[in-house]
Image: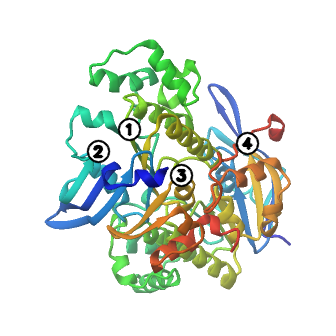
Amino acid sequence: MTETLRGPIDMLIEIENLSVTFHAQGRDIRAVQEVSLTVAARESFGLVGESGSGKSTILRAICGLAPISGGSIRIGGEAVAQNKAFSRRVQMVFQDPYASLHPRHTIDRTLSEPLAIHGLPIPDARIQQALADVGLPANFRFRYPHQLSGGQRQRVAIARALMLEPEILLLDEPTSALDASVQAETLNLLSRLRVERGLTFLMVSHDLAVIDHMCDRVLVMQHGRAVEELSREALATAQMKTDYARTLFSASADRMLEG
Amino acid sequence: MSLLSVKNLRVTFDTEAGRVEAVRGVSFSLGRERLGIVGESGSGKTMTGRSVLRLIRPPGRIEADEMTFDGIDLMAASEKQMRALRGPRMAMVMQDPKYSLNPVMKVGAQLTEGLRLRDRLSKSDAHAKAVEALLAVQIRDPERVMQAYPHELSGGMGQRVMIAMMLIPNPDLLIADEPTSALDVTVQAEVLSILDDLVKTRGMGLIFISHDLRLVARFCDRVLVMYKGKIVEELAAKDLLNAKHPYTQGLLNCLPRIGGSREPLPSLDRDAAWAN
């Protein structure tokens, strides 16, 4: 079933030779260099690498938060444009739930805002449903972020990203600030929402085990370049072709119990 | 005789909302070995580490039936005695170099400050000693690092600088609070092997505080598992996979594994009885 979807026409996200260059103090910093990847509709694709490898920058470039200096990004065959139609298709969940929610806005206001920006009606039931969908009790609606735990905040951030019913979720280390048990709950929530809503994920993590659990394919990055693309099977059976991917694999925390 | 002995340690905070007990009766002893303390956020592991150095500020209070370090009663020691112990005898490495190094002071000045003021070394002797410490943590161009400000260093370098700083006075006890959580996995492995080497060659006692059970199991000799301010299980690191307590088992099982199944990860069903 998934195989038939993988024709070139069905690719939802197409990134071709993407380069991102930042200019700082008269120097050019090439954060991403000629990276290409494609993600089919309803697929879950992972980006893994160390800090500074450019994985988050790719997500930010898709959202227009990083300057693209070369190559192209197409969503559903169209070049990305930063407009409201785009944000209805693509939404992002950030790493740090302590930083990504407005501290002086109630959860109600945080969840209403995407609808308000798009001039959509904000029915009560919609907010209640959004909270229920991410497994939060209805009485959280009028709380502030500081009254919530890290895991609960990340649920709010996920609920907010889903308010506009996007097709694509960009997930930037969505669980790396969370405890192991809360990470498990959040990953389960994301997996369930992906199935229920037919979402496409592009997920960034430094944790190979998390990527392996969530993604069908993974691109290993280093110093802004794509090193190697691995299928889930290749990862599970340690069939990497490059030394760097192998290093990352053997340093991965979950190898440690066997080690 | 053990290096550190802690009996019935309690840390309480009197807040407006009532009394909060962060650590509730923790007992352990440490020889010249690597002891891991694991638990989730809020389990009291960091507070336990800080208590040993008596680094808890009011309104926090430390109580213990016994807390002795190398025969010295830490509960009875004066603040002056504690200051003399902190650094030369026992030291702590914090989690994040971004917040623990002085951002407006060059690394070299930070490394030599203690040597100049405490040990009254000359400028050149202090410099030589700092360079030596940087070499000991595998920094290959110590002179450049000495001249750098913390923001000019990567996370892994910053962490090594902090370890070097703690090791200069050659302490008997090192408390490392999540020393590798801010680092990438490959750098993490390097920093751990540096720590491991130092423990072995200098015969230090090490308390390694982490939320990462697998990392602790790999690195330590013995592990204490904390939950809500109490130790729920103590076991040899090699026996971790045979952990008896449901909390320890739950922590292990909820982690995704490479090549594992795609089934929902088992969630941790907390039992109210664990906290008692």
In the displayed structure image, the side of residue A126 where residue B92 appears, left or right: right
Q: Chain of mark 1?
A: A
Q: Are marks 1 and 4 in contact (CB under 8 Å)?
A: no
- Decide: is A128 above or below A179: above
Q: Chain of mark 2?
A: A
Residue B216 locus on image (x, y percent): 68, 64
Q: Residue at x 42, y 85 (%)?
A: B140
Residue carrying label 4: B228
| Same chain letter for marks 1 and 4 | no
Q: CA distance from mark 2 to mark 1?
A: 10 Å
Query: Amino acid under label 3?
Result: Met
Residue A175 locus on image (x, y percent): 52, 48
Q: Residue at x 74, y 58 (%)?
A: B74
Residue carrying label 2: A76
Crowd band around label 3 with a 10 angstrom C-alpha radius: few (<14), some (14–19), many (20+):
many
Q: Are marks 2 and 1 in contact (CB under 8 Å)?
A: yes
Disc nearer the start of the sequence (2/1)? 2
Q: Nearer the viewer, mark 4 or mark 3?
A: 3
Residue B7 visible to the viewer: no
Residue carrying label 1: A167
Q: CA distance from mark 4 to mark 3?
A: 30 Å
